[in-house]
Amino acid sequence: MPFPEVTRVLYRKNPLDQVICQLRFPTILRIDAEIPAQFQERVRRDFPHFSETSELRVPVPLDLQEQIPPEALRQVLQPSGNKNYGFSSEDGQWRINLTRTFIALTTKEYQRWERFKERLEIPLNALISVYSPDYFSRVGLR
């Protein structure tokens, strides 16, 4: 469904608190298996700060474990080990998150689409050149 033509409005103070673009792709195990040094080299000038976290599972009290179906309980109790690599700008207003199933760009200082797209091209080009995802299964902008 095409959008109707409208006059573009630019606000002096943008009302958006945070803007995120996430691109999902088929699992690339190499992202979890090795540190993303090549990727970092391609984004480091604009995103010099690095962090790494692992997906955590929520502990379930023993008295509740018998009330949860066994398959669901296994998923909750087993650590996933999925890594989330973060790269942020010097001022902390822009952040890349890289996991084995997605890449995302987040900003707290969204001004206009053209600027956001410019910044998005940096991690997207790095992802494609280092990891060569076959395709993107979902692209979300919120």
Image: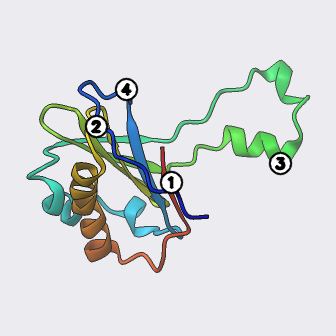
Mark 2 lies on residue: 10
Q: Residues within 10 Å of mark 1 (few under 14, many from 20)?
A: few
Q: Considering only order in the chain, which callout, 1 or 4, is on the residue closer to the N terminus?
A: 4
Mark 4 or 1: in front is 4
As rendered, which of 70 and 10 lies closer to the eye? 10
SS at badge 1: strand
Q: Name the side, left or right, on which 29 lies relative to 37.
A: right
Residues under labels 2 and 1: Cα distance?
A: 22 Å
Say what amino acid the circle numbered 2 marks.
Leu
Q: Is residue 85 above or below residue 136?
A: above
Q: Name the side, left or right, on which 12 lies relative to 84.
A: left
Q: Considering only order in the chain, which callout, 2 or 3, is on the residue closer to the N terminus?
A: 2
Q: Is residue 18 above or below residue 123?
A: above
Mark 3 or 1: in front is 1
As rendered, which of 133 and 56 lies closer to the eye? 133
Residue 71's label in the rendered image is 3
Residue 140's label in the rendered image is 1
Residue 72 point in image, percent of width and height: 80, 43
Check the image and name the residue furthest to the left.
45
